[in-house]
Image: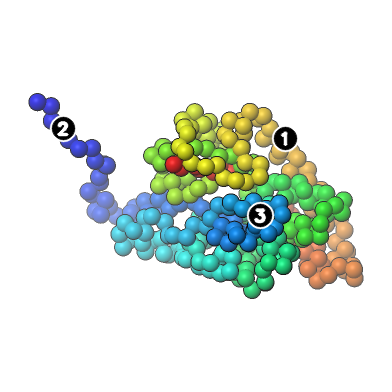
Amino acid sequence: MQDTVTQRWPLFHYFPLLPAELRLKVWRYCLPFRVIEVYDAPQASLLCAVPGIVESLPSLSLEPPIISRVCREARNVVLSRGGIQPIGLKHMRAWFDTRTDIISIDPEHVLFFVLRGNGLMRRQDVSAILQGYISDPTIPLAISSQLIEGGWECLLQCKGTQRRRSVVRWAMECMSQRTECVVVLDHAAVHLDYDYACACGLWGLLAESSLAYVDAQDPAQIQKLRNVHRNERSTGGKYPERPGIKSLGEYFAPENTDQRIASFTYCVEALWLQYRTNPDMGDDAALDDYDKRFWVAVSSRQPPKFTYVVAVHLVLP
């Protein structure tokens, strides 16, 4: 008679006997990578009154990483790296890890300026902690390539609204404070079941992140993304309602990564050159205090080193 045994997850009973340094490395390896955008979904009802802004937005990660529930040692590792802080709109509390998480500035969803410009929010509604993180050069920053490519027309050709020019100037100032910066070339979405999402590792070992950044110039990561595309299946989940988001099949079709990088590089170098070749503009009496500070900040620094990525949204059942 065949012995039937209930399938169980593999266990490693000797883990507590490992050296403390090795256990800490394992816990740190399990920590997720999260992207914190400069808005939050629970306040999406405010966006309904703003033309051109989508109503469905990805939410902030409110909870600590899952491993914080495993044992006291794992929880201590988690709490030593991050905490629940009021970084959302109207000081909504959410988890933020200053070592692994990255702040993203997207042209369509810069809530600071959009809501303030439409009179829907006061300055004190914006978390000072999040503004401090954005200005901190040690916190990783991601910028959408569309923001800088659009800034070429806004700042150098005086096109677009004053509010959009303010957003571009603000993004340029944030970049000028850093030596490295992530550039999001495109957005894509993929349907996967939870087990495969964990196995591929793009969204963390426990698939805690809904968004992954894949290096567009790393052949190994792109091949992993192609493997994900081959294993994609309909999960019944809904694609994020976001302008310009594609399926993985649509992303791979044009193979235009080099063209997108060249376009971004041309625009950002032209913008930087404009400020570096006209340093005296910071003394122009016609500029307000913010413009003068921005001009001096950008003109005195070199552009950061850029890493080009594809933002891949995970859609679970």
Figure check: 73 above or below 255: below
Residue 87, given in percent of the width and then of the height, sits at: 56, 65
Q: Nearer the viewer, residue 22 or 88?
A: 88
Front tag of 2 and 1: 2
Residue ID for mark 1: 259
Quarter of the figure that contains the C terminus = top left
Residue ID for mark 3: 109
Check disc 2 and report its element: helix, strand or loop: loop
Specify the quadrant of the image occupied by residue 194.
top left
Query: What scheme was used to colour the molecule?
Result: rainbow
Figure check: 189 above or below 296: above
Distance of label 2 from label 1 (alpha carbons): 57 Å
The amino acid sitting under disc 1 is Gln
Residue occupying the point 77% across, 56% down: 164
Disc 2 or 1, which lies upstream in sequence?
2
Residue occupying the point 83% across, 49% down: 153
Residue ID for mark 2: 4
The amino acid sitting under disc 3 is His
* Residue farthest toward the left in the current orientation of the protein: 1
Residue occupying the point 74% across, 64% down: 117
